Amino acid sequence: MNYLVIFGKPRFLGLLTDLEQEIDRGTNVVIESARGLEIADVVGILSEEQLCKYKERFELPKESEASDNDQLKSTEPPLQYVKLMRFADELDVSDAKWQRQEEDEALPMVRKMLKNHSLPMKIVDMEYLLDRKKLYFYFTSEQRVDFRCFVKELAKEFKTRIELRQIGARDEAKILGGLAPCGNPCCCSYWMLEFLPICIRMVKEQNLALNPSKISGLCGRLMCCMSYEYDTYSELWKDLPNPGTKIKTSSGNYQIAGVDIVSKSVRIKSPEGVEFLVPISEFKLFKKTVEGGEKWNLHVNLADQAEAHNLFGKEVFALKGSCSELDESLEKDCDECSAHRPKAKGKNSGKGRSFRK
């Protein structure tokens, strides 16, 4: 049986292959990865088809081709073969918990040491391996940094092998975690297996406001969720015109003012300057009709629609009667309210002061 596991603060993925025993989901196991001994969480069992998809997705070589030299690279692959050493017992779990606590206590001291070296880098987090033979530091920097003296001081302080790994802004959010603008935990630190490429074109095709505060995540980059519905929007946009497109007719040009995919309608501006909505399913018929010189009468005028709906999309009930009747009813209500109001006496009446009986 094949299993998928997650280990390390950067949430690396590992494959346990050809196991005879059955392991429940969420079980803590001790594995040997390219970095050393670590505690991993079992995500679940993989079928042969799923295993092949993971290998193709992450371009994982065959297990026989993965030599020791390939596993000892400066950067760990997002998916690698790991070896099951044993099931984690209470001692392993308590040691890992104590190490996390020790890391949180030592991190301020490490940042103070970095400040003394005046290096243009930021220490994000640190991580001990289970056997404490190696200590990893994750940092961000916008340029190359010569931290050899800093590593020597760290090795002298912690008395173990030190490795510094440079990560990006999205990896920083993945390690630290937090709540996204939607109120849920960040996708990258919760369930995502890899970062997908995201561009501003995805935002434009979904008709979202190009406001950095609205479309950026905790990392300062475009939110990963911008790619979730992009394929659906791309499929819908195939048969739709681009905003700003003009339809030339004998009576003038119709202009595509906008496209609302959610309501499945196209907003069109007529040569007279009147805007109206045309359902997406009827757009081809509309284009054929107006290009033939005929008028399109099956439209919804936006001006009439605005009178029937308020800003929140709720129906506004029409008031029966003329404006004068409405004014008379309002004056009557005001007279009834003033009848119950105490009258002011004296010189200071009407100046906003409190009344005395």
Image: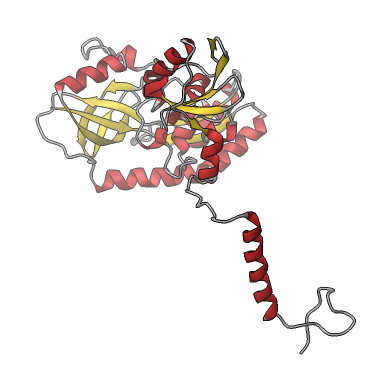
What residue lies at 70% left-to-right and 80% top-to-bottom? 341
The residue shown at (48%, 44%) is: 313
**Colouring scheme, one of rainbow, by chain, secondary structure, one colour:** secondary structure
Q: Is residue 28 left or right of residue 194?
A: left
Does residue 337 sit above or below 308 in this rendering? below
Q: Nearer the viewer, residue 219 or 11?
A: 219
Q: Position of residue 236 (x, y in %)?
A: 38, 21
Of all residues, the one furthest to the left in this rendering is 20
Residue found 47% across the figure and 15% down from its top: 294
Q: Position of residue 12 (x, y in %)?
A: 35, 28
The residue lying at 51 percent from left, 46 percent from top is 312
Horizontal arrangement in the rendering, residue 239 relative to residue 146 (left or right):
left
Give the image location of residue 104, x and y in percent.
48, 44
Q: Quadrant of residue 136?
A: top left
Quadrant housing the C terminus: bottom right
Q: Residue furthest bottom?
A: 357
Residue 188 location, x and y as percent?
41, 32
In the rendered image of this protein, does residue 338 appear above or below residue 27? below
Q: Quadrant of residue 248?
A: top right
| For residue 66, side relative to residue 249 (left or right) | left
The quarter of the displayed image where residue 303 is located: top right
Eyeballing the image, is 356 above or below 100? below
Between 182 and 179, the residue placed more toward the observer is 182
Q: Is residue 297 visible?
A: yes
Which residue occupies the foreground of this view, 38 or 57? 57
Which of the image's four quarters has the N terminus? Answer: top left
Say whether residue 156 is visible: no
Q: Is residue 268 left or right of residue 286?
A: right
